[in-house]
Every structure is written in C-alpha cells, then in structure tokens.
Image (cartoon, helix red, strand yellow):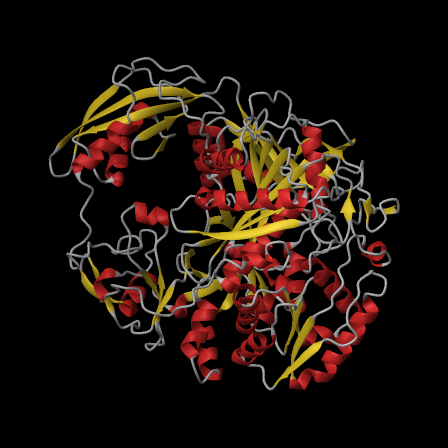
Amino acid sequence: MSNRGDRGRGRGRGRGRAAKVESVPGLSQSSVVPPAGRGRSTVRPPGPQQPPQQPQQPAPPQPQAQAQAQAQAQAPPRDTQAVVPAGESQEPHTPRVYGGDIRTKPEHITNKSGTSGRQVALYSNYFRVVRRPDAAMYQYHVDFNPPLDSKCLRKALIREKEDLIGTVRAFDGMMLYLPIKLAQNPVDYVARLKDGTDVNVTIKITKELAPDDPSCLQLINVLFRRVLEQVELQEIGRMRNFYNPKQSIPIRDYNIELWPGFVTSIARYEEDVMLCIEVSHKVLRTDTVLDSIGRVMANVHSNARNVVARQILGNIVITRYNNKTYRIDDIAWDKNPTDTFETKSGPVSFVDYYMKSYNIKITDMGQPLLVSMPKKRDQRRGFDGPILLVPELCFCTGLSDDLRQDFKVMKAVGQYMFTSPADKRKTLEGFVSTISRKPEAKKVMAEWNLEFDQSLTKVTGRLLPPEKLFQSDPARSYSYRSENTDWTRDMRSTTLKNPINLKECLLIYPNSEQQKAKEFWDTMRRAIAQMGMVIPNTPQTVAVPDDRCDTYVNALKKNIHPNLQLVIVILKRNSKDRYDAVKKVCCLEKPVPSQCIVSRTLNKNMMSVCTKIALQINCKLGGELWAVEIPLKKTMVIGIDTYHDTSQKGRSAVGFVASTNPSLTRYFCQSFFQAPGMELAAGLNRVISGAMQQFQRMNGNELPDRVMVYRDGVGEGQLSQVVEFEIPQFTQAFKEAAPGYKPKFTFIVVTKRINTRFMASTGNGPVANPLAGTIVDNVVTRNQWYDFFLISQSVRQGTVAPAHFNVIYDDSGLKPDHIQRLSYKLCHLYYNWSGTVRVPAPCQYAHKLAYLIGESIHKEPSMALANHLYFL
C-alpha cells in the first residue's frame, strides 16, 4: 500500500542531501587539494597537507615522541622470549574479534538452535577457508631505533633481510606476519640509511596465530585482497567491495553502465573460518556532474544554484582516473580549474595538475569545483580539510530518485542486477574456481598454505508453517502459501479488525483537479463498503487556486479545526517541498493525521488506489487491519531505528515505536534527535517512560510482564555501544517505572544490509529461493553470538535476502524457537503491505517514522499524534 508518503522505500537508508550551498568556512587555495592518484602525483593524499597557521608549508611529519609512544603501545612485553602457543596470547584479553564484533551470547544459552518446523536443505554463499593441518602463521613485532616516521622506509629496511625472513610476508609498518617460524629470536641487525644514519632493527616473535585469532582473520582478508587484484578486480568505495571496470555493462539508453563485482569478507563462524562472497554491481552514470549542472542551468532561470545543490549534494561520485569515490558536501561556486593549490614544488593549477599527472585536458574553465570533506579514516591520518573535485571528471554513482521511479530504467538494470539463485550459484562457484586456476592468485594462497572449498557451503534450515490471520471475527481465519506471502484478496473481502469511522475530513485540491477529487471521493465510498468503515458522503473541501507551497500551507492553517480527524491533500505533482510543507503543518503546528496523494496516481486503477488509501487512512486514525495469534500475554514489543537528518549534517532522527495492546497491532510512537557524538541512550529514558505510561492506560493500569526490543540501524562495530549504553538505559527506565518493577527483557539487533544469501536444494534440479518462513541458526551463524537468519518474504525476481537477528541480551526464559517464531509472526503485522515484510513490523514502523522526521519535518512531532501510525 504505497503512496507519496512511502517514497523512502527505494532510496538508500540514511543518504541525506544538504540543503545549503554556502561555501565551506575557511576554504582557500592553500587549504585544498585535488584527489591524488596512487603514486602518480607529487601531491600527498586527499586532504589539507598544511596546518592552517602555515598554509604554504607541507604537513609536518609525525613527531618522534608520538611515533615512539605508538610503537610502545603495540609492542609485546619486553620479557617475552618464547613463542606463545596458538590460541593464547600475552596481550590483555579483549572480547573484540576482527570486524568489531563482540561476544553477546548470554551465558545460559548452550544451544541456540531451534527445533520447530521441517528441515530443509540449503546452500549458502560461503566457502570454507582450508588451511593445511601442519601449516602455521606467526606474528612478529618490529622495532626501529631510532624510530622512523616513513612507513615506506620501514618496509624497505625489512626487504633488506629477505635472505633471512623470506619473500613471503605481510608487513604493516610495525607488525610482521610470516608463514614460517624464524630460527633465531629475536633477530637483530643494523641497517644504514642513504644519509649514513644507522638504524637498529629488532624482529621479535609475538605469537603463533590460531585460525580464529583476530590478527589471523585480518591477515587472511589482506591476503585475499591481493588475490582479487590478481584476477583484475579493483577495490572501489567501501572496504571489501571489488569491481571489474573492464567488464562494464553499458545501458546506453539511460546513460548508465554497470560494473560487475563482488562484496567479500572472511570471518570465523560456528566451526570454520569462511569466505562470504556476494555478487554486486556498481551503478555509474556515463554523463558527468558537469553535464548535470549544465542541464539545470539551461532549464532553470531562478534559483538555479539551489536546484543544482539539491540534485548534487549528498551524492557519491567516482573519479575514473583513479577509481576513487567521494561524497559531495558542497559546491565552491567561487572557484574554477584555473585556481591553484600548493604542492612540494610550488603552486600548480588544477588544469596543469591533471594534464601532468593523468594526461587529462580540462575543457571548461568556468565550471565551479565540488567540495568533499575527508572521511574519518583520512582525518585520523591528519587530513582534516576539504578536497576539491572538477565536475567534468566526476561521475555520479547509483540511481537518482527520478531514475528509480522510471519502470523502464529499473527493468533494464534489474535484468543484470537481480540474478536467480541458479545463476548466482554458477557465478560464485565459477569465481572461486577462477581464483584456484589463476597462477598468480593460486601462488598467493599457496605461499600461505591456504585454499578455498570449490563449492557453496551446505546448511540445514527449518521451514516454519504459514501463519493464520484474522480480522473482525477471530473464528474466521485465512492463510497463504509459503511460495506467495500475499493475502490481499482475502483481506479485502472481510471486515477490518478494528475499523474507524471517519466523520470529520478535510479534502484540499488544486482548482484544476476538482473533477478528479470528486471521482476520488466517490470511489473511496465504494471501496470501503466491505471494510466496515464509514465516511461522510461529502467531506469538507477546499479548492486552492494554484500548486504553490504557501497556498497549501495557508489553506491548512485556515481550515484545520480541533474536531478534524484527517486531512487529505491532492498534490498536482510529485514535489518534495510541497509534501514537506504539508507534513510540517500537520505534524507540528496543527497536529492531525494527513494523507498526501499525487494527482497522477489517481489516473491508474482508481478502485485499487482508493482501497489502498482507505486502508492507510484507517491505520492513521488508530484502527487495525488484521492480526495473528500472539501466545505471549502482557508483552510489549519495541522497534527502534535511525535515519540521518538531511537538514543538519551529523544529526540523526530516531524512530521509537512500542506496542500497547495484546495483539501487538497498536503502537505508541515517538522520536527524538541524536546529535553528533551523542549516544542514542541519551534520549531513550524519556520515550521508554512515555511508552510504559501509555501501556498502563491501555491495559488497566498494568505494566508489561515482558519487553522485547527489535533494534535496527546498528552498523558494523556498533554492538559494543548498544551493549554498554542502550541496554542499561532500558533497565534503568524499568526501575523508574514502578518500585520493584523488573520485566523479562530481550534485546535483539536486526540487520537487513547483509551479504548472506541462501539457496534451496531441489534434488537434481537447479537451486531455488527458499520459502518464506525459513530459519537458519547453524554453520554460518557466529559462535560468539545468539543469532539466526530469517527469510520472511517470497520474491519473484532475483535471490531472496534474509534478515539477521542477534539476541544480545535475554533474561526472558524463552527458548530459541519462541524468539524465532515471534519474530516471524511480527513480519506479518506491517499495515502498509498485505503480505510479509523483511523485518518485524516494529522495526519497519520505526524506520518509517525516522524517515519522515529526517527527510521532511526535522523536528519532533506533536505528542497529539503519538498513538497513531500517522507516518505510513
């Protein structure tokens, strides 16, 4: 049931666009550099190379004292002489493993596997990493006295001893990894620099690496990157994303091309170290950012720069001369390619720099420059100033909102990106086979005594039975097939679970859409005939003279009154500024549930559109559509998600929803903002207290016996923050709710953006998508987590994507079967779609709320709306 308010579904989560076009403060010719190539330019890596107080000087090298402190911090104990056995370490114990994971499995969980459902044979996109039984890897610490700031120089001094340590090694400038154990420990030698300075080098063994040691896993990932380079894949954008530009797929009709590639990671799972590899495609525009700017300038005559900013800011671009990606944070309208910046050899213009370094001739000397602020990892290396890019050399990645809404574009792209399970299996196994056959790649693996299994890992899953749904009469239930989890037809022919009568409604539309507005209301009255809802024969109507934002706002403020239940606004076009203006009035100034409808939507099947809108309206008024059987009583389920606020860089909107009735279908909804650097827990206490109070009002002044939290929006490496800050906030809020109050509590982190895929075995036939309700809680789950995968949807195209559930806190006494089954039940209760969704409904509701706040209204909504799903 999608309308104008559901436009966040196609856009990547959290990708906000800045609204301002002002220049970056402090931007000057001497404080910016172009993006440098890898070893091809005299300019150092992106970011300012000079401190502000000395703009004409290169950045000073790292002070020796700092280098010494860093070396001492990573050095082994001085009295360590013997190798530490595999699996042990003399370093302080830490629960972290490679990838930022921490151990979250509760102590009382000895078996996290469920038993309900029938077993199904599956394949997963994992390949076991096989290490020769007698092989080993060793970690050495290398000390330089006096300390050397240059990493390249340190590597050069290590190369001088290849006769001793061999040519097979991995060295990060301080830690040395070898597949052999050196006969001598420690190894001491004196190296002489070109200036005649003697440097004492000491190589001392730290430990033998166990297969699941974090350092070992990190080393194997580094080695695998070398392997991928040997098969002509390039790492582009985020870590572990590799693509092959030489095999690009052009889609010329839409100025798009696709780069095929893979997303990879190597980690420890239940029993083995495995490689997870997923097919990926990089979407690139073949027209440049300068082309986009030119089109706007040619077609827009007023506020053209603001229009350009809205289209470009926040986008990720790629510079093909070095295949690096950048986020566009601003536009320097006062700069152009003839401006200069400082290098070691003196000032140079952007024009001359690109000609000399890349043999690229810039043609447009009047184009502005794009500004990209360095990433956190660049800031940690000392680069904290803006990077300037030439629009003529930048190409946008991904699909714009306009292209996503074009069915023909999505169909053309989808035939390459959405591969069937059989094709995916063939591609993945073929790729691993290529690695094993490629001499250069095979050599890298053989040197470290490693190899990969040649076939996908087999997994045993379990298929849960389909759920029974009911509406007004619990005795009359209906279900669905696991091959197609859609109950639209059954639902529409039955009275809703809790229909709400609409008595006072305001309908606003442009004068030009008067006839369409009349047809819409007449069709609405017919559409709700079987739903049990009642609406007035004629609503209060306001015809506005034009389609301007101010016109809609003035009409809303003038006509909204205290008894009004709903506002419906027909928009002449799909315009974000008009939609945002309506939502700000209806969520902040004159709180009332609102429904926006784009006029062209009513040109389609009017009855079908009106039926979907009527269902949304019932939810926004506080009604319920359907339910499933919930065996747990006096239970509250909570959903939490975050979304970047597009009006303020670094700030996030937090969506919080909590169930208030036994069937888990009505919710208390609140939001708050998370400032940069602020823990989410800082705002949780207030919303948890509000949820508890509302639950009491709805349930005879009783508090819930059980609270289950589904937390979405937790990125890699953030689990420790959730454990340390958010869970204690909940337990503290429980104590404050009532004396001695301590409900049974479960906290589950839900992740959608994962690369794990499953394919169902069909005997001798090709693999297929698993059926909805498939659970996997073994082999490819983490041995330090209480986790499982759930496939809750059925898809018609491509390979179905599971969701990952990680139970990081649990004192509920529930069995794994209970948690898995309840999670699947909740996937049936999202009222914007009459079918199952990928994550539990509380997560999806929290995302919709956070999206509305972060994209449109940028303030906390009125509490008058807290008991309505007004954000659907």
**Quadrant in the picture for the C terminus:** bottom right
Residue 614 vertical placement versus 521 (above, below)? above
Where 544 sits versus 486, above or below? below
Residue at the extreme top of the image, as rendered: 82
Asked if residue 401 shows in the view, the reply is: yes
Closer to the camera in the image, 37 or 772: 772
What is the quadrant of residue 558 in the picture? bottom right
Residue at 66% x, 31% y is: 777
Name the spot of residue 528 as percent of width and height, x first.
81, 65
- Taking 247 as reference, is 489 left or right? right
Residue at horizontal 53 percent and vertical 71 percent from the top: 581
User: In the image shown, does 131 or 867 lie closer to the viewer?
Assistant: 867
- Up-down: is 562 above or below 107? below
Residue 252 visible: no
Left or right of 698 in this view: 256: left
Give percent across and percent down for residue 680. Answer: 46, 44
Image coordinates of residue 737 in percent, x first then y, are 54, 37
Which of the two residues, 771 or 21, is positioned nearer the viewer here?
21
Residue 257 position, x and y percent, is 56, 63
Q: Residue 427 occupies which quadrant of the picture?
A: top right
**Quadrant of the image occupied by residue 329:** bottom left
Q: Is residue 539 left or right of residue 227?
A: right
